[in-house]
Amino acid sequence: MMDKKNRLLLLFPNPIATIPGGLTYVGKRFKRNGFDVKIHINTFRNFRSVDQLLQEIVRPFAPDVVGLSYATFNVLEVYRLQRMLSETGYFVIAGGNHPTICPEEALRNGADLVVRGEGELAIDDFSAWFGAGRDPAGRAGLRGTSYIDPEGHVVHNAKPPRLTDLDDLGEMDFSAIDLDEFQVADGSIKGLNVISCGRGCPFQCSFCSHRDWMKHAKRSTDSILEEMVRRNEAHGITDFWMSDETFTVDRDHIHEFCDKFIAAKLPFRWMMGTRATSVDEKLLKKMMQAGLTQVTYGIESANDETLKKTRKGYTARQALETVVMTGKLRLPMYVNLMTGFPWETPDHVEDDVRFIKAVEKYVNCFQLYGAVIPYPDTPIYEDYHEKEGFTDFWLQEKFQNAGMVIYQNVANPYKVSTYFQRNLYDDTYVAEDYFFRFTPEYKRAVARMGLLIGRKAIEAQSLSRIRRHGKYALGWASHALYRLNPRLEQRIVGSLVKVNRVHDSRLTGKFIKK
């Protein structure tokens, strides 16, 4: 602990539509170590360029330390901000997915220290070191961090063991965040309903980078339930989203959670995501009895070749059986499907289309995007980046907005996407050959699937019949215009639209009728 309170500003520089829960834990840990903490998250509602962040957020707070958390997209601007901060004299810490994967790159672009992976123990070490006078030699004792030594060499300190007692972390701390930045039209705060029940994912999908997170750790069921109760008392939340990538990794743990939830007669509802083979009928029934109102399945493909090459660990038949079983229980479902894998042909897409038609009566909505992005450190990146020519793509201007959904990563989505891509299906990465080159036949097959998925999404929304038909017709016309001239529709709509209305609609839950 420090004798005096140093000031720490945590920045999430890329625009985001919901509160990043992980940053609340980071801020909480720094507070525990004696820092005066402020968190600023760049939002679409009040977007600031990196120059504005420096002038309007950093300088007025006058922090001793600036910590940045960021992913891979828009990294050139983030690096420009880091360099400006460093040149101005601030001590800069970088953390999050991208610095964990590319620590040397972050250090060469203005960061004084990179925290790799789980950050709590690194924060403890850093706080003690910083408060004791910042002896350069002491950096060698900061577990799980990287830095540049006086000779210009990058040093990677060994990582500590993963945390196992997640209860010790406590609950998310929103006190350093301006919650008004995340309020949407209905008055709700996006991200305030999120509960983190565990960390890590033991599975090895080829499009995910989880080498630092393979081992799964979980909170106690009492800790989870207590946070739900307190979140309700503090903010009136009654509908929760369990944010774990695979909520049902430990089925016995979830049975225990449900038993306690039922015994306590809690009046809450909740949603979660999991794998097709990580549930069974008994568990689904128990979770529904305990307040589960929606499940999201990461099916990803209905083609066995793609499932095998992406290391999903199950077959298309198993995925189909799980979705049908869930549908017969009348549990609302959101199903994720991916496209754009380099080996795929129109036949692969047709398998997805047949799957959609077979289960659409059970599914509330299918994912409105899903083209694979070969993020750094993923097997699919390692296998293809040299052959396809996208090595270090994140350092090229073209790819700066390449996140899960391209139109959601920019201040003006209307200039980089079509009506079809925003409302029916975002096929940008396939249609424009971002990473892999596809045949015209494959692109048409993906677009046809997108029309099918988009129609389902429109039907799931609470719209009049006329509005549903009108929205679908606009989507169809938008895609037809795009095929004639890929930029014409974007230029027309982008010049006409003055208000960004996409922000308020960035919720999966809008497709689930209460």
Image (spheres, rainbow, N blue to C red):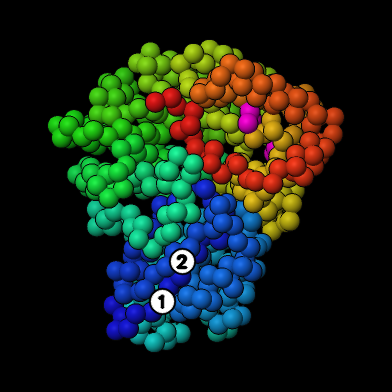
Quadrant for the C terminus in the image? top left
The correct choice, above or below, for 434 with respect to 84 in the image is: above
Residue type pointed to by label 1: Arg
122 lies left or right of 488: left
Q: Residue at x 35, y 85 (%)?
A: 132
Residue type pointed to by label 2: Leu
Residue range (magenta)? 423-430
Q: Residue at x 43, y 59 (%)?
A: 178
Q: Gap in Å between the C-alphas at discs 1 and 2?
A: 10 Å
Image spot of residue 51 (x, y percent): 64, 69
Residue 10 shows which numbered tag? 2
13 lies left or right of 350: left
155 lies left or right of 242: right
Image spot of residue 340 (x, y percent): 66, 33
Helix, strand or loop for disc 1: strand
Helix, strand or loop for disc 2: strand
- Asked whether disc 1 touches disc 2, contact meaning CB atoms under 8 Å apart, the reply is no
Image spot of residue 14 (x, y percent): 57, 57
503 part of magenta stretch? no
Image spot of residue 282 (x, y percent): 27, 21
The correct choice, above or below, for 137 with respect to 335 in the image is: below
Residue 7 shows which numbered tag? 1
Which one is nearer the viewer's eye here, 484 or 127? 484
The correct choice, above or below, for 428 with respect to 8 in the image is: above
Q: Residue at x 49, y 37 (%)?
A: 507
**Whether residue 100 can be seen here:** no
Is disc 2 surrounded by few (<14), some (14 to 19) or many (20+) residues within 10 Å? many
